[in-house]
Amino acid sequence: MAIIITEDCINCGACEPECPNNAIYEGSSPWRFSDGTSLKEVVLDNVAFDASIEKEALSDDFYYIVTDKCTECVGFYEEPQCAAVCPVNCCILDVNKAENKRELMDKKNWLHGK
């Protein structure tokens, strides 16, 4: 599963620097697949595009996590670091985005070219 940030977020920013995949962004900030990864090109739904293309913010109000970049810190840490440092416990598992450890490790390797 990926982690999501709930609307209980107080915008403290503690989570953002902890993410090894650079999957966390401040509200209203655009994101890129290339941020913090080795990706140069991404193929989604059989469409290839430059990984440095800016994508629209997923939230205007509070920090958000890009699901396609979240690995729950698998391959880096024993637990999701965003959840570990969040003072209001708003970084939680997204039950709608179930992924097993192997899938998360594959995503980590895809993001970082290993």
Image: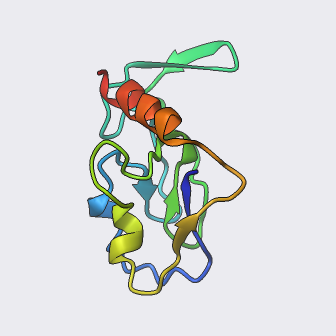
Decide: is 77 above or below 49: below
Identify the residue at horizontal 60%, vertical 73% (top origin): 6
The count of marks equals 0
Q: Indicate the position of residue 92 as horizontal and vertical percent values.
A: 55, 69
Q: Quadrant of residue 16?
A: bottom left
Identify the residue at horizontal 51%, vertical 56% (top origin): 65
Q: Indicate the position of residue 57 as horizontal and vertical percent values.
A: 57, 53
Q: Indicate the position of residue 95 as horizontal and vertical percent values.
A: 68, 58
Examine the rendering and report whether any part of residue 87 can be seen. Answer: yes
Out of 25 and 69, give the one closest to the viewer.
69
Q: Indicate the position of residue 53 as horizontal and vertical percent values.
A: 48, 30
Identify the residue at horizontal 39%, vertical 85% (top origin): 87
Q: Quadrant of residue 35?
A: top left
| Colour scheme of the picture | rainbow
Examine the rendering and report whether any part of residue 52 can be seen. Answer: no
Decide: is 49 above or below 105: above
Identify the residue at horizontal 48%, vertical 34% (top origin): 102
Out of 12 and 107, give the one closest to the viewer.
107
Decide: is 71 above or below 28: above
Out of 31 and 111, give the one closest to the viewer.
111
Specify the quadrant that holds the C terminus.
top left
For residue 62, side relative to residue 113 (left or right) = right
